[in-house]
Amino acid sequence: MKKLLLAGMVALLMAGILSAGLVAYAQGPTPPASAAEQGGPNDQSPTYTCSLKSGATPTITADQAKAAALAANPGTTATKVELDDENGCLVYSVELSNGLDVKVDAGNGQILHTEAAGPEDSGGGEGLEGAEN
């Protein structure tokens, strides 16, 4: 009787393991999370090519970076200009009155990326760093 009960329990256990394996197999492998889904405090997306790496000395001024951002976005004003290290690149981050954050290469003044400013970027136009309106 004990052997029959033990054999029944083993059979149920094996059936459970096999069914769980079949369900997992039917669902397929879980794709890796994208960089945006992984997030995290060190997530620095997007990546772009720049002329100056982190730690270098900028070859353009904050005013030149602001002028480049404004030229690419007519009808706006700059609310904030900061020299930043992003993705290993030295860039000026120029926040505009239309809510955009423009990344300008600190070496050659080229626009590297434009994105909507996040909540942490909304300084409300308080104090420009390194530039004037």
Image: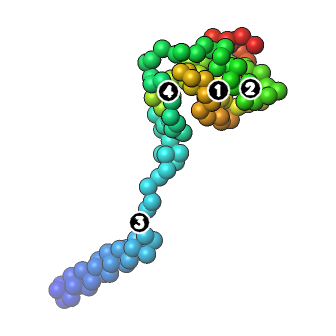
| Mark toward the start of the polypeptide (3 vs 2) | 3
Give, as a three-letter code, the residue at label 1. Answer: Asp
Say if residue 86 shows up in the picture: yes
Alpha-carbon distance for marks 4 and 1?
Answer: 24 Å
Q: Residue at x 49, y 50 (%)?
A: 34
Name the residue tied to disc 3.
Answer: 29
Alpha-carbon distance for marks 4 and 3?
Answer: 40 Å
Q: Mark 3 vs mark 2: give the one in front.
A: 2
Name the residue tied to disc 1.
Answer: 121
Give, as a three-letter code, the residue at label 3. Answer: Pro
Name the residue tied to disc 4.
Answer: 51
- Is the residue marked by circle 3 packed among few (<14), some (14-19), or many (20+) residues within 10 Å? few
Q: Residue at x 59, y 32 (%)?
A: 112
Instruction: Tell me the quarter of the picture where residue 121 sits.
Output: top right
Q: Residue furthest front?
A: 108
Name the residue tied to disc 2.
Answer: 71
